[in-house]
């Protein structure tokens, strides 16, 4: 028995609905919790100051691996917070304060622990 042509639009609708639902839930998983993001991003900005890009990249990759985070998640989180300028401003102030604290102590990526 051949499916009727009328069933295809309905099937397409359900598939579209499913894909939209999945893409929304994936985006939520890409957003890093605020305090974890502040800690990670502060360290990444400090590591970015190294003259050697290869060393900075390797150290950044190690930091993110230790935290169980990817560069895609960092980018998604930045984009998420930039859509809310008041929230982004508050987070950037906290990151600035954290960078000041970090610069006052020796850099030790092995001692970092993330929840």
Image (tube, grey):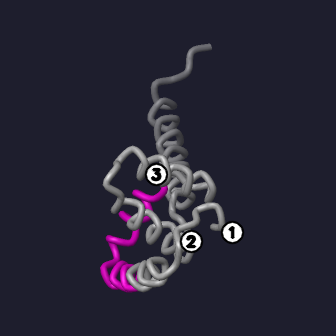
Question: Residue 76, which numbered label?
Answer: none
Residue where numbered disc 1 is placed: 115
Residue where numbered disc 2 is placed: 36
Q: Main secondary structure of the magenta part?
A: helix
Horizontal and vertical percent position of residue 62: 56, 51
Question: Residue 71, which numbered label?
Answer: 3
Query: Label 2: how many residues lie within 10 Å, few (<14), some (14-19) or many (20+)?
Result: some
Calculate the distance from the C-alpha at mark 1 to the C-alpha at mark 2: 8 Å
Q: Earlier in the sequence, mark 1 or mark 3?
A: 3
Q: Earlier in the sequence, mark 2 or mark 3?
A: 2
Seen in the image, is 82 located left or right of residue 61?
Answer: left
Q: Classify mark 2: helix, strand or loop.
A: helix
28 above or below 89? above
The range drawn in magenta is 73-93
Q: Residue at x 51, y 49 (%)?
A: 61
Q: Are marks 1 and 2 in contact (CB under 8 Å)?
A: yes
Quarter the C terminus occupies: bottom right
Q: Residue at x 42, y 83 (%)?
A: 100
Q: Earlier in the sequence, mark 1 or mark 2?
A: 2
Calculate the distance from the C-alpha at mark 2 to the C-alpha at mark 3: 14 Å
């Amino acid at each position: 028995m051949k499916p009727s042509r009328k069933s295809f639009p309905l099937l397409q609708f359900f598939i579209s609905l499913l894909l939209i639902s999945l893409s929304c839930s994936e985006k939520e998983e890409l957003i890093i919790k605020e305090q974890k993001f502040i800690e990670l991003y502060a360290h990444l900005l400090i590591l970015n100051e190294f003259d050697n890009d290869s060393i900075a990249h390797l150290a950044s990759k190690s930091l993110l691996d230790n935290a169980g985070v990817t560069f895609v998640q960092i980018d998604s989180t930045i984009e998420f917070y930039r859509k809310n300028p008041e929230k982004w401003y508050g987070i950037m102030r906290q990151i600035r304060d954290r960078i000041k604290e970090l610069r006052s102590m020796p850099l030790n990526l092995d001692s970092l622990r993330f929840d």
